[in-house]
Amino acid sequence: MENYMGNRTFAYFLALSLFGEKGRHISTVLLSILIVFLLSSVLFISSSLHSVIENALREEPDLVVQRVEAGRLVNLPLKWEEEILSIRGVSKVTPRIWGRYFTGVKGKSFLVIAVDFLDENSHKTLEKLIGETELKTFLDGRHMIVGYAVMEWMKSHFYKEYYNFIGRDGEIKKMKISKVLPKEDNALFADTIIMGIESAREIFGISEDEATDLILDIPNDAERDFIADKISSLHYDIRTISKKESRAAYDRMFNFKGGFFLSLFCVVLLAFVLILYQRYSQVYSREKRQIGIFRALGWSMGDVLKLKFLETLGVVTGSYIIGVSIAYIYVYILGAPLLKNIFMGNGNLDMELILPPVLDFSALSSIFLLYALPFIAAVLIPVWRISVSDPKEAML
C-alpha cells in the first residue's frame, strides 16, 4: 500500500511539473518545436529530392557522347555511331537532338529532346515518358509531348492545342500538342518537349548527318568508366557524360549549396544553445528550492533525478513529435513554400515540384538523439549537483 501511495505521489508531482506549471515550459517547448521543425523540414525536402533524382537517373542514358570545340558544344557527325558501336560492351547507340529552344519572351526556354521514332531502339529511350501515346502520331512530324510547365506557359500565351516554332531558316513550324506529362511523375521534365528528330532538325537547323549527342546503352556497370575512357580517346573533341556526372548536375539544379546548409545549421545550433542555457539557468534559479524541499521531505537523489528525467523527456518527446508533424504537413501537404525554392533555385519556367513523401527513420532517430541527449544532460547535471548538496542550502 505504501509503495502504491508512493507511486501515486510521484505520478502526481510528475503531472504537476509537466502540466501545472505550463509557463515554465512554454518558451522552451516553442523553441524546441521550431528547431525540430527546421531540421525535419530540411530532411524531408532533401530526402524527397534525392528520391526524385534517383528515379530520374533510372531513365538517364548510361553514357552520353558529345562534341566540344573551343569549350562549347557543337553538333557531332553520325559516323561516330559506328565507331562507338564497335567497342566491346556497348550494346546500343542512339542519335539524339537535345537542346534549348528560346521563346524570345524574357529568356524563357524549353528543353527539346528528339529521337528517331522510326527506329525501335531509339524511341525505347523515351518509352516511359511517352507511355501509351501512339508512335504513329509522331511519324507525320507535327506532334509533340510537353511537360506541364511548358503547357502552362503556352496557355498563358494563348497556345492551347499547338505551338508555332520559328526555325533557324525563319520559317514557322507548327507543332500540335498530343500529350501533357503529368506533374506527379515527371517533375524533372516539367520544361521538356519531346518530338520526332526530323522536326527538331528543322527547328534547330541541324543536317541529316549530324546530331547533338549520342546516347549509349552499356549493360555492365563495371565497364562504363573504361568504355568512357576508350571513347574519349577516339577523337580529341569528344566529351562523355556518365550517370554519376548527371547526378551532380541534378544536385546543382536543385541548389544543394553547402552555404545554405551551413547557415541553417548555425541558426539551429544557436537556438539550441539558447534552449540549453535557458533550461540550465531555470534549474538553478527556479527549481533549486523545489529540489531542496523534495530532499528535505525524504526523497532520495534517485527519485529527484527520475522525476526531472521523466519531466524533461516528456517535454523533449512532445516537442519532437509536434515539430516533426508540423514539418510533415508543411512539406508534403502544403508543398514547402519558401523553403523548397531555396533548394531548387530559380527555375526557367514556373514549376510546381510535387515532393513524394519519404520517411528516413534512421535520420529522424538521429535528429531526436542529437536534440534530446544534450537537452536532458543540461537538466540532469545541475539537478544532480543540487541533490548532493545540503537540502537547507538548496532551500535558501
Image (cartoon, helix red, strand yellow):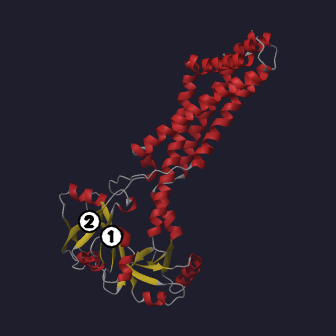
Secondary structure of the residue carrying numbered label 1: helix
**Residue placed farthest to the front in the image?**
1
User: How many numbered discs sit on the rendered protein?
Assistant: 2
Q: Which residue is mark 2?
A: 179
Residue shown at 81% from the left, 20% from the top: 388
Q: Is 193 located above or below residue 29 in the figure? A: below
Can residue 308 be seen from the camera position used here?
yes
Secondary structure of the residue carrying numbered label 2: strand
Q: Tell me if mark 1 has few (under 14), some (14-19) or many (20+) residues whose alpha carbon lies within 10 angstroms of its own.
A: some
Amino acid identity at mark 1: Ile
Amino acid identity at mark 2: Lys
Question: Picture quarter containing residue 16?
Answer: top right
| Mark 1–mark 2 CB contact (< 8 Å) | yes
Along the line of sight, the residue nearer the viewer: 10 or 147:
10
Going by the image, does 196 lie left or right of 174? right
Q: Tell me if mark 2 has few (under 14), some (14-19) or many (20+) residues whose alpha carbon lies within 10 angstroms of its own.
A: some
Residue shown at 71% from the left, 13% from the top: 289
Q: Which residue is mark 1?
A: 130
Q: Position of residue 251 (x, y in %)?
A: 49, 59
Question: Picture quarter containing residue 333?
Answer: top left
- N-term mark: 1 or 2: 1
Residue shown at 70% from the left, 19% from the top: 4
Q: Position of residue 139 (x, y in %)?
A: 24, 79
Going by the image, does 133 lie left or right of 266? left
Q: Is 190 located above or below residue 25 in the figure? A: below
Q: Position of residue 114 (x, y in %)?
A: 33, 75
Q: Position of residue 248 (x, y in %)?
A: 51, 63
Q: CA distance from mark 1 to mark 2?
A: 8 Å
Q: Quadrant of the C terminus?
A: top right
Going by the image, does 185 lie left or right of 16? left
